[in-house]
Image: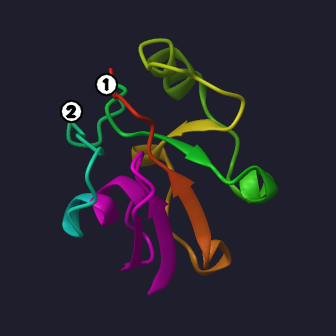
Amino acid sequence: MTAISFITPDGTRYDIDAADGASVMQAAIRNDVPGIDADCGGACACATCHVYVDEARLVEIPPMEAMEEDMLDFALDVRPNSRLSCQIRVKPDLDGLTLTVPARQA
């Protein structure tokens, strides 16, 4: 298990243990993290699992592929550290990662 933290728009912190190999989105859904809607179920066909990755740790996440980049065009308030949580796989190297949930999802 890998420790991941989510910060919701109201400042509430959700510290969860995520199963290695699962997507960060799956971990959020399993732990009832508000604001991660995941309308497409993790198929990278929407932008409702948009998160902001802690900028200091962004280099630890594999670069996004074209499909994710295209889907982020539908997200609100996209920033340089924006990612779709369905495209981030949990692995031990990400232990302690902090993700911030945007105020609104697309």
Q: Residues within 10 Å of mark 2 (few under 14, many from 20)?
A: few
Residue at the spot of label 1: 45
Q: Residues within 10 Å of mark 1 (few under 14, many from 20)?
A: some
Q: Secondary structure at mark 2?
A: loop
In the displayed structure image, the side of residue 70 where residue 64 appears, left or right: right
Q: Amino acid at mark 2?
A: Cys
On whether residue 44 falls in the magenta region, the answer is no
Residue 80 pos. (x, y %)? 72, 30
**How far is mark 2 from mark 1, CA to CA?**
6 Å
Q: Amino acid at mark 1?
A: Ala
Q: In the rendered structure, which segment of residues is drawn in magenta? A: 1-28
On the image, which quarter does residue 56 sit in? bottom right
Total numbered badges shown on the rendered structure: 2
Note whether 27 is above or below 52 in the view shown.
Answer: below
Q: Residue at x 45, y 56 (%)?
A: 11
Which quadrant of the figure contains the C terminus? top left
